[in-house]
Image (cartoon, rainbow, N blue to C red):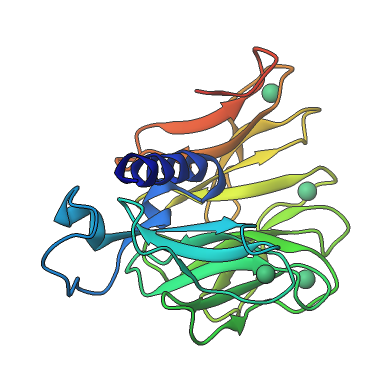
Amino acid sequence: MKIKYLMSALLMIFIFSFWACAAPQAVAKTAPVKTKTTESGISKTAQKYKIAFFSERDGNREIYIMSMDGSGQTRLTNNPAADWLPSFSPDGSKIVFQSDRDGNFEIYTMNSDGSQEVRLTDNPAYDWQPCYSPDGKKIAFASDRDGNYEIYLMNKDGSGQVRLTNNSAYDGKASFSPDGKKIAFHSRRDGNFEIYIMNTDGTKQLRLTDNSAYDWYPSFSPDGARIAFDSRRDRNSEIM
Ligand SMILES: [Ca+2]
Ligand SMILES: [Ca+2]
Ligand SMILES: [Ca+2]
Ligand SMILES: [Ca+2]
């Protein structure tokens, strides 16, 4: 069972290298650990940090958290809609996620114990792929509210929603740089998916990749020096 839990944790870290805005947001230090001995015996440190993930194990997509050794798996959402793509706030107190519980996807936040769910967006379009800024004050997300997907930025309470990209192609999957000054994202504006960066006010949009394959799902390294992304240039997905 120890190995099973460890593999589960490692798998989720792997998945979040694609699906969270960045690995540091998916793994967050939460409330002080009360137990002095670990359930799995792997390490006390592993239980101090939590991983948020989604699973269909209970019949539909729900948000769960667990310790980094796979112990303490707890379901946080409970409704028949799809609740997914969770990402911790930098201080670990909140989780932002997307849900179609009201008929279309909206951005929601909740406390890291699942309490106090709050809807931040409210419109008939899809609003999804949320990501906290490193200071926790802003949330970037993608929405097709103007007819095609663009990157938007809002305050953590949902106020002040502004569009950062503006073109007829798909723009999505925002990921903040660790210093909060840049947003990496993927866009199809040049014919196929490429990785771009821009300032957090939408200025200076710059393409970083240039090839005929899909390059998408960027994520900054913790030191901000590099960007990991997924590419199909070898005809299947690879991590660059
Ligand atoms: Ca659900
Ligand atoms: Ca919506
Ligand atoms: Ca667009
Ligand atoms: Ca490409």
The residue lying toward the viewer, choosing from 181 and 113, is 113
Q: Residue furthest bottom?
A: 116
Q: Residue furthest top?
A: 234
Number of residue marks: 0
Residue 213 visible in the shown view: yes
The residue lying toward the viewer, choosing from 221 and 102, is 102
Q: Is residue 169 above or below residue 32?
A: above
Q: Is residue 90 above or below residue 111?
A: above
Q: Residue furthest right?
A: 147
Residue 131 visible in the shown view: no
Report x, y in % for residue 116. Answer: 51, 87
Tell me if 213 is positioned left or right of 38 in this view: right
Quadrant of the image where one finds ligand 2: bottom right
Tell me if 117 is positioned left or right of 6 in this view: right
Report x, y in % for residue 3. Answer: 33, 39
Identify the residue at image location x=53%, y=61%: 86
Tell me if 39 is positioned left or right of 56 in this view: left
Q: Quadrant of residue 124?
A: bottom right
Identify the residue at image location x=32%, y=52%: 68
Q: Residue furthest left?
A: 36
Identify the residue at image location x=81%, y=59%: 144
The residue lying toward the viewer, choosing from 106 and 171, is 106
Tell me if 104 is positioned left or right of 194 in this view: right
Q: Is residue 111 above or below residue 222?
A: below
Report x, y in % for residue 49. Answer: 28, 59
Identify the residue at image location x=79%, y=63%: 126
Report x, y in % for residue 182. Answer: 47, 48
